[in-house]
Image (cartoon, rainbow, N blue to C red):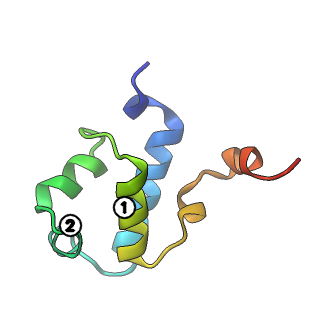
């Protein structure tokens, strides 16, 4: 299965979209903040383009959210020392 079809990836993308919208930032503006075209953001949000870790960090920085905010709660146990 391709990563972009993984439900966990879809949830991460949904959280990016929700964070962007909650801040009142358009795809165009976020793209400008990242030095990318609006289509870059659109393709990520529509799961047409796979987001890499550095891009996710850049998006988090632009949206002023922690990377951990994007990680689905069922995956957070992986990152704790349990």
Nearer-the-camera pick, 63 or 81: 81
Tell me if mark 1 has few (under 14), some (14-19) or many (20+) residues whose alpha carbon lies within 10 angstroms of its own: some
Nearer-the-camera pick, 27 or 52: 52
What number is the disc on residue 27? 2
Tell me where residue 4 appears, x and y as whole percent: 38, 33
Residue located farthest toward the right when viewing the structure as drawn: 82
Check the picture and name the quadrant holding the N terminus: top left
Image point (41%, 30%), residue name: 5
Mark 1 vs 2, N-terminal side: 1
Image point (49%, 74%), residue name: 65
Which of the 4 image quarters holds residue 29?
Answer: bottom left
Q: Is residue 68 above or below residue 47?
A: below
Q: Is residue 7 above or below residue 68?
A: above
Image point (12%, 54%), residue name: 39
Tell me where residue 2 appears, x and y as whole percent: 39, 23
Residue located farthest toward the front when viewing the structure as drawn: 54
Position of 50 with respect to 75 (left or right) is left
Image point (39%, 55%), residue name: 54
Position of 59 with respect to 41 (left or right) is right
According to the image, label 1 marks what residue? Answer: 17
Which of the 4 image quarters holds residue 16?
Answer: bottom left
Tell me where residue 46 appears, x and y as whole percent: 27, 45
Tell me where residue 51 appears, x and y as whole percent: 35, 46
In terms of secondary structure, where does tag 1 sit? Answer: helix
């Amino acid at each position: 299965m391709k990563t972009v079809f993984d439900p966990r990836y879809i949830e991460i993308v949904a959280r990016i979209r929700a964070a962007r919208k909650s801040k009142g930032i358009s795809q165009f503006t976020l793209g400008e903040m990242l030095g990318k075209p609006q289509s870059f953001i659109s393709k990520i949000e529509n799961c047409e383009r796979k987001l890499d870790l550095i891009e996710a960090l850049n998006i988090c920085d632009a949206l002023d959210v922690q990377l951990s905010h994007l990680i689905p709660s069922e995956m957070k146990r992986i990152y704790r020392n349990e």
